[in-house]
Structure formats: C-alpha cells, structure tokens
Amino acid sequence: MNHFMQGAVLTMGLLMPCMALAQATPTPAERMAHQQQRINQGIASGQLTHHEAVVDERHLRTDERIRAQQRAHNGGAPLTASQRARDQRLLNNNSARIYDTKHNARVAAPQMP
C-alpha cells in the first residue's frame, strides 16, 4: 500500500467517529422537547408532584425565552460560541434538575376517579 492510500485510510478512520458524533448530537430544540417528554412521563408515573412539574416546566420556558432573546439580539444570525455554550449549560442544568426531582422520593398524590 502506498503512502497516499495509507494517509487516506488513516484520515477516514479519524473522520468517521467525528461525523457520527456530529449527526448524533441533538439540537437544543430537540433537547427541550425531550426534557418536556421526561416531565410529562414523570407526571404520568407519579414520580413528579404537581409543584415539581410546574417548577421544572418554568425553568424550561425560561430557557426557551433566553434562547429567543439571544436570537433576537443577533438579528436572526446564528448564535455565537459563547451563546451556544450558555445554551448547553442551561439545558444540562435543566436535565439534572429534572432527574433530581424525579428521583427525590416524593410521589404525587393519587388521582381520584
């Protein structure tokens, strides 16, 4: 195998995992939708009390509002690197908060038929 082929094989071997990672990364909108699904599932299963669900949804709406403000501030242009980092940090905090409230041993009151 000549040096060109070895370089091409090496390059493809290094790029393939990066390409797969780029395709697998959910967008912030997808992450928000997934977090909302987790809240809904927690309500349905009784893992979240009504108050906990309201608080988690409030945090989610606040993050959506912050993202909209960032887009408006940029005049519709893509978010800057620091804005994307802040966005990810907020979403990570929300995800952890939802996990904590679903696993804090408080259970919702049973619904009366």
Image (spheres, grey):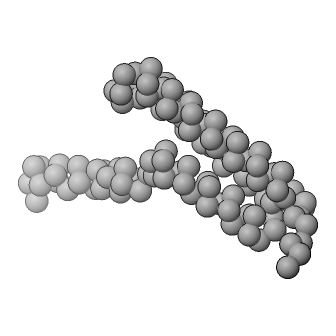
**Residue 70, placed above or below residue 19:** above
The outermost residue toward the bottom is: 113
Judging depth in this view, the residue of 17 and 110 nearest the camera is 110
Q: Quadrant of residue 75?
A: top left
Seen from the viewer's position, the closer of residues 111 and 58 is: 111
* Residue displayed at 76% across by 49% down: 54
Outermost residue, front side: 113
Q: Residue sitting at 29 percent across and 50 percent down?
A: 15
Q: How many marks?
A: 0
Q: Is residue 38 left or right of residue 6?
A: right
Left or right: 79 in relation to 40: left
Looking at the figure, which quarter contains the N terminus? bottom left
Between residues 57 and 87, which one lies in front from this camera angle? Answer: 57
Tell me where residue 70 appears, x and y as whole percent. 48, 26
Q: Position of residue 17 (x, y in %)?
A: 36, 55
- Residue under the point 64% across and 43% down: 60
Residue at image point 70% right, 42% down: 58
Between 34 and 25, the residue placed more toward the observer is: 34
Quarter residue 77 falls in: top left
Q: Is residue 78 left or right of residue 56?
A: left
Residue 25 percent location from the top left of the image: 44, 51
Q: Position of residue 49 (x, y in %)?
A: 84, 58
Viewport quadrant of the C terminus: bottom right
Q: Is residue 100 visible?
A: no
Q: Is residue 69 visible?
A: yes
